[in-house]
Image (spheres, rainbow, N blue to C red):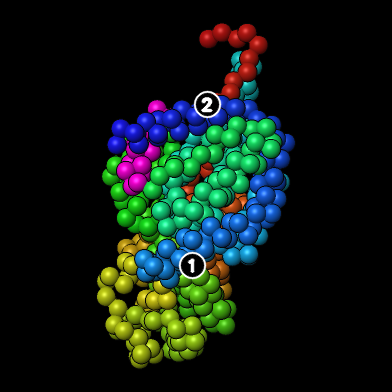
Amino acid sequence: MNDLAATLQTLGRQARQASRQLANAPDRQKAEALRAMAETLLAQRQQLQAENERDLLAARERDLAPAMIDRLRLTDRSIELMAAGLRQIADMPDPVGELTATITRPNGMQVGRMRTPIGVIGIIYESRPNVTIDAAALCLKSGNAAILRGGSEAQHSNRALANIVRQGLVQAGLPEDAVQIVPTTDRAAVTLLAQLTDYVDVIVPRGGKGLVAALERDARVPLIKHLDGNCHVYIDDAADLDQAETIAVNAKTYRYGICGTMETLLVHADVAERILPRLAQRFAEHEVELRACERSRQWLPDAKPATDDDWATEYLAPILAVRVVDDLDAAIDHIDRWGSGHTDSIVTQNLSHARRFQREVDSASVLVNLPTCFADGFEYGLGAEIGISTNKLHARGPVGLEGLTTLKWVLTGDGQTR
């Protein structure tokens, strides 16, 4: 444990030193590093996939869940998307040094705020090796150093990706310690990193409920996190039912293992008879298991009876809870009680209902006539995201460049005294 603590202290010191250089690096240099990473990523695709196959083989031997294996796999498409994300972030405006509108006080003093890097960011994540690239790119562009601790199930993939990142940093003349990976799968390193208050400014956990709950208990460094993605789609009585069918199916079946997947479908009682049989057929084609309330089972005879646990569960699997509600108030009440504050959507042609839903549902993202799987940094125009936050302080929703910076007050005068 002493050796492990010393290793984390060394990583922290190196990251802090690198962060000072990054905070003052010109955007041209950061963009050069990101584009070099993208080129190297594609050039080393075969070697990367060979390392990824080692992780996939171990995952199958451990009989990991299909959703976790899906997150772990690096396909040609996912590698191309990572490269595209690097280039997109390189082309985005640099947030560092951005000034808010200044005001001039009666004494002539000018008061404004400047966007600055947070400093050193620790990212703790599980079976998503693409996070290594996303996190490195966002931290670099926003002027932050990063310490990455990936899951043991992706250790070979993460090391290969971290090496690609470091090659890009060196090629652009930036400190290679700007992005470091914790060189051990020992779980004790997670707690040590989350308690490294001398060097780490914020921790971003990207993983399951167990990881986030443990960090909430043990961390001394502030967290940007979400615990669950228990997302809802509510089909209103004023919905276009063809649109509602398309949205509901996409919200559930786009990908089962992402935090923006719809886990509960709420349907207004006045349209249940017309929409639920249609949706039952569509979900059956996708082999989605339905767990329904007593009212909805008259149109979903093959569904299992739903329990309170179903309303509270983030399945991350082809399972969907279904509930018929009397009106918009009942839908909002259900989301307020059972939702996780992540992403919720209403399907309606009634503008008043849409505005009420967006105003009264207290989630990080509230959508109208869109599937919840749009909860993603790329789709918001943020580029790759470092995570989705259900925090109400500092950053909320997809955390991109702006969420990885903070603001400081900058005042300019001409000799005024108080």
Q: Residues within 10 Å of mark 1 (few under 14, many from 20)?
A: some
Residue 67 falls in image quadrant? bottom left
Q: Residue at x 63, y 14 (%)?
A: 413
Which residue position holds label 2?
Answer: 17
Which residue position holds label 1?
Answer: 70
**How far from the left and from the top, in percent, is residue 86?**
65, 50
Q: Residue at x 32, y 63 (%)?
A: 337
Is residue 267 in view from this perspective?
Answer: yes
Query: Which amino acid, by three-letter code, is at mark 2?
Result: Gln
Query: Which amino acid, by three-letter code, is at mark 1?
Result: Asp
Q: Secondary structure at mark 1?
A: helix
**How far from the left and from the top, in percent, is residue 58?**
42, 63
Vertical arrangement, residue 322 with respect to residue 156, above or below: below
Q: Residue at x 50, y 75 (%)?
A: 253
Write the start and end of the magenta stretch as one range.
Answer: 186-199
Question: 63 or 193: nearer the eye?
Answer: 63
